[in-house]
Amino acid sequence: MKVLIQSFSFKRTGYPVDKTGKGGGFVFDCRAIDAYDYSVRDNQDAPFPHMHLTGLDPEVAGALDKDPDTQEFFQAAWLMVRLDVEKCLRRGFNVMTVNFGCTAGQHRSVYLAERLTNEIRYAFPEVGVELVHLELFHWPKK
C-alpha cells in the first residue's frame, strides 16, 4: 500500500487533482491554524518577515512544534489518517491520499505533511509513503 501526502496552496493551486483514480482522500485546511507569530521574524517591520522560510526550516518547524493549536490540529488529523490506513490495510486497498493546504503552501501545510510522513513511516513500516510539496517551485531560493 502507498500513501500519497501533498502540501499545497489554496491561493495558488487550489485543491489538488486526484491522480489516483480513487476519488479523493483527505484534505486538511491548515489555514485554521493561526500560527503566524512564529517568533522567527528577523525584520519585525517587513509585511511577511518569514517568507524566506518554509515548514522545513527549523525556525518554523520548532515554533509550530511548540504551538498548542498546531499540535491539536495534527493529533486530530493523525487520528483520522491512522484509522484509514488501518482500514485500507485490512481491506487490501493499494493507495490513499492526504493533502494539507494553507494560504501559500509553504509553512503550515509543509510542516504538517512532513510530520505526517514521519508518523506513518514509523507506525506503519510496511506502507510506502510518497511526499510531494506542490508549491516547491514557488518557494524562495536560498
Image (cartoon, rainbow, N blue to C red):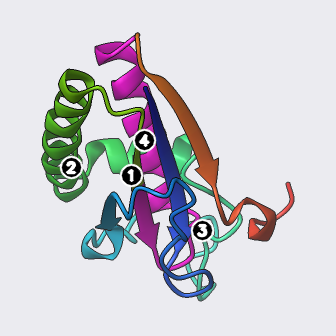
- Work out how far the residue at label 4 is from the one at label 1, CA to CA, in angstroms: 23 Å
Point out which mark residue 62 bears. Answer: 4
Q: Nearer the viewer, residue 81 or 106?
A: 81
Where 62 falls versus 139 (above or below)?
above
**Amino acid type at image mark 1:** Val
Was residue 117 drawn as part of the magenta stretch in this picture?
yes
Q: Badge 3 is on which residue?
A: 50
Q: Position of residue 87 (x, y in %)?
A: 17, 32
Dividing the image into 4 quarters, which one contains the C terminus? bottom right
**Cβ atoms under marks 1 and 3 closer than 8 Å:** no
Read off the magenta span. Answer: 99-125
Residue 43 as seen in the image, left or right of residue 30: right
* Disc 2: CA contacts within 10 A as few (<14), some (14-19) or many (>=20): some
Precedes in sequence: disc 1 or disc 3: 3
Q: Position of residue 88 (x, y in %)?
A: 25, 32
Was residue 100 drawn as part of the magenta stretch in this picture?
yes
Q: Badge 1 is on which residue?
A: 98
Residue at 65% in and 71% down: 51
Q: Residue furthest right?
A: 141
Dividing the image into 4 quarters, which one contains the N terminus? top left
Where 72 falls versus 48 (above or below)?
above
Residue 70 as seen in the image, left or right of residue 45: left
**Cβ atoms under marks 4 and 1 closer than 8 Å:** no
**Amino acid type at image mark 3:** His
State which mark lies toward you, 1 or 2. Answer: 1
Q: Badge 2 is on which residue?
A: 77
